[in-house]
Amino acid sequence: MSEAFSPKHIVVTGGAGFIGSNFVHWVAGNVPQVHITVLDALTYAGNLENLEGVPGDRMDFVHGDICDAPLVDELFAKADACVHFAAESHNDNSITNPAPFVRTNVEGTFTLLEAARAHGTRFHHISTDEVYGDLALDDPARFTEETPYHPSSPYSSTKASSDLLVRAWHRTYGVAATISNCSNNYGPRQHIEKFIPRQITNILCGIRPKLYGDGKNVRDWIHTEDHSSAVWEVLTRGRIGETYLIGADGERSNIDVLRAILSEMGKEADDFDWVRDRPGHDRRYAIDSTKLRRELGWQPIHTDFAQGLRQTIEWYRSNQQWWQGAKEATEAKYAKQGQ
Ligand code: NAD
Ligand code: DAU
């Protein structure tokens, strides 16, 4: 096992989003004496409320864009590591308007890598299992670190592009980088455009949930807190230049997840609408996280999906002010797409 890296000051890009904010809370709660600088543009997906409760002496917030090279340079000069979450993250949005995905996910990652190269900053890149494309429903295979890249959507192709930039900056310039590719996250503070919170908030608003296509697509669900703990392991003990897949053996079809939400919220199993499928919709994702578990000894703690889902539903029920403002516009956008 490689020697542990102990950063004292990390820049977390996208730290006001869903997974980034969870990571900031996780570090503040689990690792003493690390200062966090959050760099976030506060797009529609970023929300400062997500960082409430993080002690002020552990974190400072910079409202800015990862494509702003002078700003990024200034922040990297003061930090010893960057954990890069900032991205345009939603597949459906990438299909209607891919331009911001290319800018933030590709140009933004390039800008950060240039600063990491200039300052010798340790760089951990957060990526997705979607870079590998999809698997058939009847295929026993799961993605590994050796699976060839085969992204399907504008979103996943920009994430694949950013992964390749990170690999090239490591190999050519010696940037001390690692990459992790994680499966579908769930938990509190996820934007309501995404599958699980969209259906929960639909039910809370008296709107029928919406299921794409035939509902048989499979996603490999992981609680966002387990993603955070895995990222910390890779940042501090992962081998430089390596990729680690993060997953918690949570494969489930969309219809099964929806029926679990309906049942938990006191609705009938058929209380939902079938809607137009997503163009190019990936069939199945599945992660083999053996490398992460064997090499770094990581284990998920949220292994009971039903319980995690119950807690997530409860969070959206108790935090209506967090999502209500975005609900109408989110549903209007989907209605336009026939979804
Ligand atoms: P999110 O959309 O909830 O949050 C993204 C954050 O990035 C927001 O706070 C937003 O304001 C910020 N941001 C966007 N553009 C920016 C820019 N140009 N400059 C600075 N900040 C900017 O996303 P998420 O679901 O939390 O995903 C975080 C990361 O994890 C992404 O890189 C995503 O590809 C990856 N990922 C997500 C999942 C998932 O299930 N959501 C799974 C695997 C990997
Ligand atoms: O696999 C990791 C990826 O997971 C991340 O890289 C992405 O950032 C994240 O958004 C997520 O991508 P998906 O496209 O899998 O997530 P989404 O929540 O959009 O959809 C999950 C599944 O549910 C997918 O098969 C589409 C389907 N779906 C989605 C919505 C919003 C529906 O059936 N109905 C819906 O209303």
Image (spheres, rainbow, N blue to C red):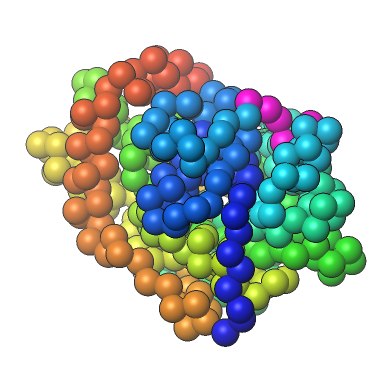
Q: Is residue 128 magenta?
A: no
Whether residue 275 is visible to the viewer of this picture, yes or no, is no
Left or right: 189 as drawn, with respect to 307: right
Q: Nearer the viewer, residue 216 or 76?
A: 76
Q: Nearer the viewer, residue 266 or 279?
A: 266
Left or right: 117 as drawn, with respect to 187: right
Magenta segment: 63-68
Q: Compared with residue 192, is residue 249 higher up or lower down, i.e. above or below?
A: below
Residue appearing at x 80%, y 58% in the figure: 120
Q: Quadrant of ligand 1?
A: top right
Residue appearing at x 75%, y 65% in the figure: 176
Left or right: 174 as drawn, with respect to 248: right
Whether residue 256 is visible to the viewer of this picture, yes or no, is yes
Quadrant for the N terminus in the image: bottom right
Q: Residue furthest right?
A: 172
Residue appearing at x 60%, y 59% in the figure: 7
Give how far across and how far down residue 330 sits, in percent.
45, 22
Give how far across and how far down residue 149 sits, in percent.
69, 64
Dominant secondary structure (helix, strand or loop) of the stretch shown in magenta: loop
Quarter of the image for residue 210 reads top left
Quarter of the image for residue 112 reads top right
Residue appearing at x 48%, y 26% in the figure: 48
